[in-house]
Amino acid sequence: MSVLVLIEQEGGSIKDASLATVTAARQLGEVHALVAGAGASQAAQAAAQIQGVAKVLVADDAAYAHMLPENVAPLIVSLMASHDALLCNATSVGKNVAPRVAALLDVMQVSDILSVEGADTFTRPIYAGNAIATVKSSDAKKVLTVRGTAFAKASASGGSASVEAVSGPADAGLSRFVGEETSASERPELTSAKIIVSGGRALGSSDEFHRLIDPLADKLGAAVGASRAAVDAGYAPNDYQVGQTGKIVAPEVYVAVGISGAIQHLAGMKDSKTIVAINKDEDAPIFQVADLGLVGDLFQIVPELTQTL
Amino acid sequence: MKILVPVKRVIDYNVKPRVKLDGTGVDLANVKMSMNPFDEIAVEEAIRLKEKGAASEIVVVSVGVQKAQETLRTALAMGADRAILIQTDAEVEPLGVAKLLKAVMDEEQPGIVLLGKQAIDDDCNQTGQMLAALSGRPQGTFASKVEVEGERLEVTREVDGGLETVSLALPAIVTTDLRLNEPRYASLPNIMKAKSKPLAQKTPADYGVDIAARLTTLKVTEPARREAGIKVGSVDELVARLKDLGVAA
């Protein structure tokens, strides 16, 4: 089986999620990595180093910049004539592009896979992670999105894939990238951070959130996350959100501050290696998954913790 | 401009789903069902666009069991103008739903199709993107802001690194994210009024669409449980433990 992986990169370096997707793809067959966008050639060299990638396909074209699905999907469809499966990251890019490709191929996509059980059988979370379904696809070609935290990352070096230029349809003219607002931060990125400090609704305000959570995160060299309740209340921006409707993370250490542990939040962080919970309610569900729990007033504990560390 | 809003009847957001003992699925018997929360946001956004004068009519459509009528009535009570129920007892996958919605689009010719980014039961996050593909129209997924700018639609999207804005040629497909708006509650007079708003009954066969499933669910299980650890008594003890883990110097 030959498997196409849509690679996500930034400034020529491959995103961690794509390294995990390569691992999933290797369980299915020979891996071909697609790198698309203006100036994609530099990233193609990086993709060629990923262990387990047999061939890199590079579409160096401005039409594929910003991964506009109206342009990227037809490119992938043209490449799928010679591939049996497409794997994308279950990230905002992959979730945007993959279903568009699937529909054009008349394939029912399997979203957010947790494991590969066979050439056509996969597991995936449903009901916000409250249940795990094992599904079998009867489509001739497979389109999958992959949950990055469920697969080990392929090594980004040591590979020596051949690089081949490809081209696809021109700009469809349906959509245009206008701009972006990225949260510029010195802190590590949430989905690849080794340590995450997350705040919940108990912080009470945006000011308190930043006054208490930010210094603790900086002391630990951690990324900052938030529960959906904290995001809904406006204490933290949406790209901080950890949970079924936000980001799925699995750091070495996850520190949950003032987070009760709603099922949808747990779905996004319960694969963390060590979970630390600070909450004043000793019956909060977060303590049922926490390795280390501290019951008490976070407004006292957090500054003391930041001070002591 | 007409806006089409597909809505899905799903398990209520506040109900904890229980996996059936025989592993065939999640137990939905006697469980409270509601409109998918992301679809509620889509209905609300359509109403706001109409209130701003950017839209003239809101048509809501649902694919599902006869009781999905209640979900459509809820949307009508919020402020949608008329409804279509494509009735089937089969579980229709996103690809099948997208094909049915494409057929409805051909009939209704909406300027915008607004739908939830994902349903909270199957968590697929596919239908909007698939509909955009099948209709050959652009897509603005995970929207946190939607603005009609003449012949185009400007959509601000929630992406992993922050926000991204795209400009789409109309007609366009938009899927909603959480922060787009806060849906209104239907008032009692509007609930009464909704009862007399038109609701058309259709079947998948009326649209000549094949909705046969492509995926077979072999089994459904509970996720692996994580064992609770220990509670520490003080910050100092917590720091000591973190040091053991190599987290703190």
Image: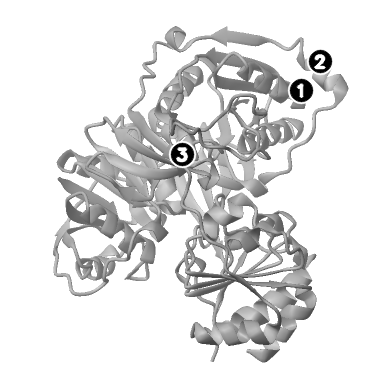
B57 vs A141, left or right, is: right
Position of B26 relative to B62 (above/below): below
Cβ–Cβ under 8 Å for marks 1 and 3: no
Q: Report the chain holding disc 2.
A: B
Say what secondary structure mark 2 lies in: helix
Residue kind at label 3, given as amino acid type: Cys
A280 vs A2, left or right, is: right
Regarding residue A139, the answer to whether it shows in the image is: yes
Q: Earlier in the sequence, mark 2 or mark 1?
A: 1
- The residue positioned 66% from the left and 20% from the top of the image is B72
The disc at residue B124 is 3
Quarter occupied by the N terminus of chain A = top left
Say what secondary structure mark 1 lies in: helix
The disc at residue A265 is none
Residue kind at label 2, given as amino acid type: Lys
Q: Earlier in the sequence, mark 3 or mark 2?
A: 3
Residue kind at label 1, given as amino acid type: Ala
Q: Earlier in the sequence, mark 1 or mark 3?
A: 1
The disc at residue B77 is 1
Residue annotated with mark 2: B193
Say what secondary structure mark 3 lies in: loop
Regarding residue A305, the answer to whether it shows in the image is: no
Bin the neighbour count of mark 1 within 10 Å (Cα to Cα): few under 14, some 14-19, many 20 and up. many
Spatial CA span between label 1 and label 3: 28 Å
**Could you say where residue B67 lies in the image, as x and y percent from the top left?**
62, 16
Position of A138 relative to B108 (above/below): below
Q: Report the chain holding disc 3.
A: B
Bin the neighbour count of mark 2 within 10 Å (Cα to Cα): few under 14, some 14-19, many 20 and up. some
Q: Which residue is at the front of the view, A61 or A205?
A: A205
